[in-house]
Amino acid sequence: MELWQTLAELGVPATVSNPSSVLAERWPDTPGCDLLLVDAALEVETVRRLIGVLRHRTGRPPAVVAFSSGDVSLIEPHLKEGLDYLAEPFLPYLVRKRLDMCRQNRDLAYVLDEMHSAVDESRFERELQIGREIQRGFLPENLPELDEWDIAAYFEPAREVSGDFYDAYDVINGDFLAFAIADVCDKGIGAALFMALIRSLLRQAAVADEGLPTVPEPVGSAGRPLPGAALALRAVRTTNDYLTTNHLHQAYFATLFFGVVDTRTGELIYINCGHNAPVVQRAGGDQLSLLPTGPALGLMRDAHFDLGFATLGRGDLLYLYTDGVPEARNPAGEFLGEGRMLAMLADPGRAATVIERMRKAVAEHAGVGEQFDDITMLGLLRHPAGPGEYQRTTEPRDDGGDGP
């Protein structure tokens, strides 16, 4: 062919291959091949497949030129595809210029594509970092400081953003403490957005409920009404109603533990929406698990949620966690396990001390292994009766570094 003779005159090495052989990846070893000359008689779809095979072979797209030795109209669909072309007469000077220009255009497009990818990746990483900062803004900047109570928390997402969250705030004229811990069923940006929505809904319901009359039932151990019952039920029910009305089709749901404790008496009212059972570590050594009282949030319309009750005595610690703690895995794939977690709770200490002990245990168990799940913990300790024991300290919110 005239084109091959011209290429030979120019000293350009060329190998003729059948398209079917190339598609089957049966072709001569041509490591320097970065130019694909295709007969314009080939279908455009076949040319696309040839480009894909060569790109897979070399790691970058080839320069592609469609040529015609006769009917120039055959080149038209290839021009629409964005390919360069050669047509008779195949004069050496013009052929060299055309091939050089085609390679330059390919290299420029490749560089621009790499630059755009780098910019997009940098922008994406920056947006993720902003999302992480915004999400941490949803966590309480400072945990409440209460007489005779000690509160600490820890939060470490497995990715840039998390589906976990915790919260704690004063309610009902400051005599009660509302607190929550939750785990959205997924990870990443979608779970983080869902987390932010749930946190906002719970807070909104808690604020809206302040000043409502206390319910006549149930009553506490002292025979008086428990104001936190109305707040807990309203917060969980309204949140679930909103989620199932507006977001059920998105198939997100969250496990949640929401509690309200009377800071004067230690009486606790809670709703456990399918969450890992928090543990009350009694000062005397016994442990009480606060089991689920209803389904996960956002899972079912008109779901029924029961109230749970417990009392935190002097020296009792309430430990709340997400499944990233017992399900922390070492490089061999072994879980930390609930048994080891419960055993570590038996040692006494301030809330921050217990949380830090658990954090170190998770880190030591995981070793250099990847963190597979978000890790969130919340501890609430009622001070022992003895004077001077566990004096209250102000614990700053954890920023995912060396623990609370």
Image: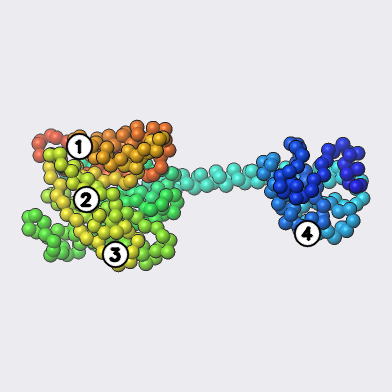
Residue at image mark 3: 303
Q: Which mark is residue 77?
A: 4
Q: Are marks 1 and 4 in contact (CB under 8 Å)?
A: no
In the rendered view, tell whether residue 307 sits above or below residue 325: below
The answer to which of marks 3 and 2 sits earlier in the sequence is 2
Residue at image mark 1: 346
For the residue carrying disc 1, how many other residues have a C-alpha within 10 Å: few (<14), some (14-19), or many (20+)?
some
**Mark 2 residue element:** loop
In the rendered view, tell whether residue 214 sits above or below residue 336: below
The answer to which of marks 2 and 4 sits earlier in the sequence is 4
For the residue carrying disc 4, how many other residues have a C-alpha within 10 Å: few (<14), some (14-19), or many (20+)?
some
The answer to which of marks 2 and 1 sits earlier in the sequence is 2
Visible residue check, residue 81:
no
The answer to which of marks 1 and 3 sits earlier in the sequence is 3
Q: CA distance from mark 1 to mark 4?
A: 76 Å
Q: Which mark is residue 267?
A: none
Q: CA distance from mark 2 to mark 4?
A: 70 Å
Q: Between residue 384 and residue 257, name the one nearer to us.
A: 257
Q: CA distance from mark 1 to mark 3?
A: 35 Å
Query: What is the three-letter code of the residue carrying label 4?
Result: Pro
Q: Residue at x 82, y 52 (%)?
A: 39
Q: CA distance from mark 3 to mark 2?
A: 19 Å
The answer to which of marks 3 and 4 sits earlier in the sequence is 4
Q: Quadrant of residue 153?
A: top left
Q: Which mark is residue 290?
A: 2
Q: Quadrant of residue 55?
A: top right
Q: CA distance from mark 2 to mark 1?
A: 17 Å
Taking the image as shown, residue 267 lies to the left or right of residue 343, namely left
Q: Are marks 3 and 2 in contact (CB under 8 Å)?
A: no
